[in-house]
Each structure stands twice: as structure tokens, then as C-alpha cells.
Image (cartoon, rainbow, N blue to C red):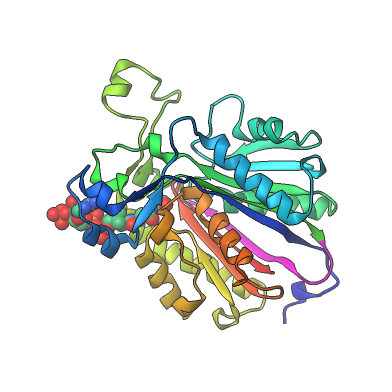
Amino acid sequence: MASNSSPKRSRTVVLGTGAGIPRKVLTNFDLEKMVDTSDEWIVQRSGIRERRIGSEGESSITFTTQASLAALEDAGLAPEDLDLIIMASHTPDMTLPSGSCLLQGRIKAKNARAFDLLAGCTGWLYGMVVADNFIKNSPDFKVLVVGSEFLSNRLDWEDRTTCVLFGDGAGAVVLTGGGDGRGILSTCLRSDGTQWEALTMLGPGSMYPITHEFVDKKLHVVRMEGNRVFRLAVPALEEVAWFVLTDAGFAPSDVDWFIPHQANIRIMESVAGRLGIPMEKVIVTIDKYGNTSSATIPVALSEAARDGRIKRGDLVLLASFGGGFTWGAVLIRW
Ligand code: UT7
């Protein structure tokens, strides 16, 4: 076993997990009535059967708060125990203040610094790596990393190539340092900004400020060259998965649970197949929640940890990719 698996070394351990999922369900059959699509096409091409959508009066903070308080309760901590909040989102409530500051105020985490992190669907995974580095410096730090997206009002509900794919929701973990050999064993982050046009939400921003033309051209919505993203994602996920496994001295056959970003069941099957990880070891939530971007992995992690599938000592492989283009992996001894 690699030296970095030594039980003596302090690592970043997950103390608790939580999810915040909207109650409102939007099925493929509902979408059949809205755009030229079919349940059969959506299930075959993406694996999605339904997704959750926020209702009137709800916004990012609704589900961010639910996920964060659930993770804190699971960790046995109070909000004031937190030293740091990192929120990954490209759909926070406001541009200023940050979503993390809104959350800090809402849950009264008065001792926490708070900032947002933007790395597309890989944002939460980036947040895990940033938190891991904070904790390497300050092992007593209690860090909340939450991935939260409210994509339903950033979709073009007339564009069948995107609106059938995404959903709203949030997932969170609470992390701290621990010394019993468990925790984050290896991490890997990558970016390729030359591929930025494959997946965009162009504005509002300094290049595309809000004008009548901006609204007419729907520049606030998600646009994606799905097939291009698909072809980039599969080898990218495989590469970072191999990186963290090799770095920590493991093989794919050692993995107990693989949680890939939930963007398309065919991408998950393809990557799992290339790695030789059977689908029984892959946590899948895309059928019920669709693609919730930076929330997919923490939501899936929370469900699998809370329903007892992931057990103490399990080797858990997380891998994500998304707009930017960004991708990465984290390997955890649970
Ligand atoms: O989380 C961020 C990362 N995002 C992703 O990972 C998404 C990656 N990409 C994908 O998941 C897949 O590319 C999609 C699910 C988006 C699309 O699947 P695909 O197999 O790549 O289909 P396609 O884009 O090549 O489209 C095939 C056909 C097209 O029709 P023609 O040109 O062959 O006549 C599309 O117009 O399917 C058509 N189509 C649809 N038909 C029914 C596209 N969207 C729909 C739809 N319903 N909703």
C-alpha cells in the first residue's frame, strides 16, 4: 500500500452529509407536453426519468440551507462550529453577496469565513480539494462544502436539447481533520479553457450585460453541445480516476463505490466499463434528479452514506466534469 495510506497521517474526513431536494417532480411525461420529446428518448439517451424543480418562493438558498443543516446535524455540529463555508454554484441567489455569505447569515454560522467557487459542474469537487488544503494547514477546521444549483430558471424551456436534462437541488458535506487512516487519500483537478464554448451560460456579465437584446436572445440560459461534451467527458473522467487511484496505490478493483457526476447514464456506464468497475458499485441518482450540476455528487454521496450503502472503511471514488471545461477526482477512505 502506498505511503500516503499510512494510518498515522492526519487526513480530511467527512463528518456528515446532507441533501436539499425540491418536492416538485417534473417527469419526462410532463416534458412531452412542453417540447417535442419523448420519455423513451430521454431515458435511452440520458437515463433520466424525472427531475426536481423549485416552486414559487423557493430559490437556491432554500435547498442550500436544507442540505447544509442536514450535513451539520449528521456531523453532530452546530452552525457556529464551522470555520469555513465553501459554496459551489453557478446559479446562486444573487451576484452580490455570494451564496455562501447568504447561507452563513441564514444559518448563523458566525465563526465561518465564506466564499463561492465557480468551476461548472466540477465546482463541488473543486471545493472539496480547496477544503482539503485548508484542513491540511489547520486540521481542527470544520469546513462545510455545499454544491447547490437552481437551474430551472436558467433553462430555455423551448430547447429540448437542454431543458430535459437538468434539475434543482443541493448537497453538502462537513469536513475536518482526522488521524485514523480514513479520509481523502488523493485528489486531482484539471481544466481546459479552450473548450469553453461547449457548455455556456453567457450572461449576465461584463461581456453580455443585461439589455433588451440580451433578453430577446435568451443569453441567460444553458447552452450545450451535448455530443461534444459527451466525447470530452468519458476519457477525462477515466484519466482522473486512474490518476487518484494510482497516486494512492490502488486499482479500480479496490473501489467499493464509484460516484461519477450524474450527467448521463451512458457516460457513467462507459467510464465504469473502461475502469472495469461493475455498475453495482456505481451510485446512480440521475434517474430521479436529472443533472443538478455541482450538486449531483454530494447529493448521491449523502443518499448512499445515509442509507447504509457506503460503510466506514469503504474506498469511495468521486469524479466529475463540466463547463469550463473542468474535471477532477477525489479518492476517500470512508
Ligand atoms: O453536466 C454538464 C455536462 N453535460 C453533459 O455531460 C451532457 C453530455 N451529453 C449528453 O448527455 C448527450 O449528448 C445528450 C443527452 C445531451 C444528447 O444525447 P446524444 O446521443 O449525444 O444526442 P444528439 O445530441 O447527438 O442528438 C441526437 C438526435 C438529434 O436529432 P437528429 O439531428 O439526429 O435528427 C437531436 O435533435 O436527438 C435529437 N434530440 C432530441 N430528440 C428528442 C435532442 N434532444 C432531444 C430530445 N428529445 N429532448
Q: Position of residue 153 (x, y in %)?
A: 39, 34
Q: Main secondary structure of the magenta part?
A: strand
- Looking at the picture, does residue 131 appear above or below residue 236? above
Q: Residue furthest top?
A: 212
Residue drawn at 74 percent across, 48 percent down: 143
Q: Residue furthest front?
A: 23
Magenta segment boundaries in residue numbering: 178-191
- Looking at the picture, does residue 85 appear above or below residue 12? above
- Locate residue 53 relative to residue 14 in the image: left or right: left
Q: Position of residue 256 (x, y in %)?
A: 59, 77
Q: Nearer the viewer, residue 47 or 74?
A: 74
Number of numbered tags placed on the structure image: 0
Q: Position of residue 253 (x, y in %)?
A: 56, 83
In this rendering, does residue 201 appear at all? no
- Looking at the picture, does residue 158 appear above or below residue 191? above
Q: Quadrant of ligand 1?
A: bottom left
Q: Residue furthest left?
A: 36
Q: Quadrant of residue 38?
A: bottom left
Q: Position of residue 292 (x, y in %)?
A: 46, 49
Residue drawn at 54 percent across, 27 percent down: 94
Residue drawn at 54 percent across, 41 percent down: 89
Q: Quadrant of the N terminus?
A: bottom right
Asked if residue 93 is among those painted magenta in the image, a careful observer would answer no
Q: Quadrant of residue 118?
A: top right
Asked if residue 181 is among those painted magenta in the image, a careful observer would answer yes
Q: Quadrant of the C terminus?
A: bottom right
In this rendering, does residue 317 appear at all? yes
